[in-house]
Image: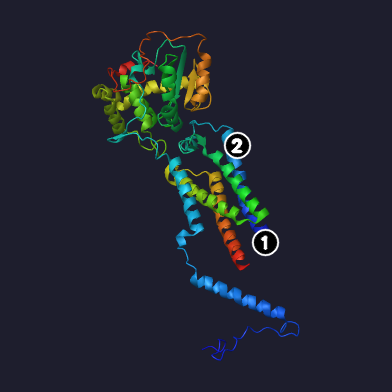
Amino acid sequence: MARGRPALVLGGFALVGLAIALYLSANELAGTVAACLPGGGCETVAQSQYSHWFGIPVAYFGPPYSALLLGLIVAWWRTGDGRFLLVGYAQGLAGVVVVLYLRYLELFVIHAICAWCVAYGATIVFGWIALVIVQRRANRARAAA
Amino acid sequence: MSTNSASPGGRRPKMPATPKTPASSSTPVARQQRREAARRDQRLAAARTTAPSKPAWQSPMALITAGALVVGLLVVILASGVLNPKPAVVGNLLQPLQPTPVSLIDPANPRSLGNPSAPVKMDVWSDFQCPACDDFALNVMPQVITQYVATGKVYLTYRDFAFIDSGAANGESHQAAAAARCAGAKFWPFHDYLFENQSTTGENSGKFTTAFLASIADAVGADRTAYDACMANGAAAMVAEVNAETTQGQAAGIHQTPTVALDGKLQQGGSLPLSTLGPAIDALIPAGWTPAPSAAGTSASPATSGSPTGSASPAASSAP
């Protein structure tokens, strides 16, 4: 199976995700003040108890996650070794579970939607679906060979 | 019986029709290729029929999927904090997980903690509806109290900066602040209950009703007669004090909550972690300073955080 185009699609999702994750992390680094301001501003703070995991801002988990996924896709593209796709599949599935949890928090607990977080979550979910499709095709091609 | 199947006469089965060319139909190489193909087909067919197939759930893909789901769920469980200690629920109230040690309350000013002659004066400007103040009160202040107030280094005072209800006298920020003042000597226990029970559905959502505030007064053991008298008519006198202090904060340059002031100097950054606040406090402690052997109003023992004591005198809360 030709890997160029599938790798481009998967890499595209991972790359967009990495860009968004870096943007969110940069915002976090710039110091989003945990404070309430007159005229609004508490909405974002209301997320404070969910915006840190184990004392680390959630935004900081995005770049390593996306970078690892991108690395796996590049490795698969270069070598054709299906194990890279398999690891990417597992990582993506775990990511999808976490993304679903975060969307649940936004919709039903925090009652606020973070557009950038939704966009990042979309790259993870759709990237994973694309990866599943690519993996199935690769498996079929291998079986036919 | 199909005409293509092996006939009883021992004839060879018919092979798939292939274009007959002089070069390919009869050469040994072509025959060998056909034989090999037939053997491969037989092996594959035998493997399909005889190999013990594992159940689908034992396939590597299923195991990897299950593993990934478990990892994802584990992250969610750890991140959701369901394993963290939870405050006990009594009636309709969550009991504070880390109550302020009542032994540190300054009898002369129930809204202050520690030794009045401590080298550093720390003011915490706050709104009881502010989620960031909640974070500061529940996560940072207990550390400050243990490490700096109980050790005699800091004299901490709570200041009202009630603005989230847009200045409405009957708004939840004002009524909660007034109720805490009306609790008199029980201000700090009241403070702890307010933040532990802050609304999780946003500001001005109707959580801090008169009845709810009264239930806190009961929980902290405030003198209900004095409390009710203080809260009568919308707690007008206390609301006026809250407004006066908020105005004082605005004049001092406060524009967000929480805001911490150390020796009057505002520390920007909202809910500052102890890693930021600690060094700022340390820098203000004179070199060679040692705590006084017996500090008035301070036992320097954070362990004594049992049931609050002291008279509930609303009047005592008027001093900032």
Which mark identifies residue B27?
Answer: none
Q: Residue furthest left?
A: B225
The residue pinned by badge 2 equals: A26
User: Are marks 1 and 2 in one subunit?
Assistant: yes
First in residue order: circle 1 vs circle 2: 1
User: For this rendering, which residue is in front, A65 or B190?
Assistant: A65
Q: Residue furthest right?
A: B23
Measuring from the top left, give residue A22's x and y in whole percent: 61, 41
Compared with residue A100, is residue B49 higher up or lower down, i.e. above or below? below
Residue ID at (45%, 14%): B153
Q: Quadrant of residue B106?
A: top left
Q: Chain of mark 2?
A: A
> Please, what is the three-letter code of the amino acid marked with disc 2?
Ala
The residue pinned by badge 1 equals: A2
Measuring from the top left, give residue A108's x and y in whole percent: 42, 46
With A35 as the anchor, is A83 left or right in this view? right
Residue ID at (60%, 37%): A26
With A39 as the anchor, is B239 left or right in this view? left
Q: Secondary structure at mark 1?
A: loop
Q: Chain of mark 1?
A: A
User: For this rendering, which residue is in front, B318 or B258?
Assistant: B258
Label 1 crowd bin: few (<14), some (14–19), many (20+), radius 10 Å: few
> Please, what is the three-letter code of the amino acid marked with disc 1?
Ala
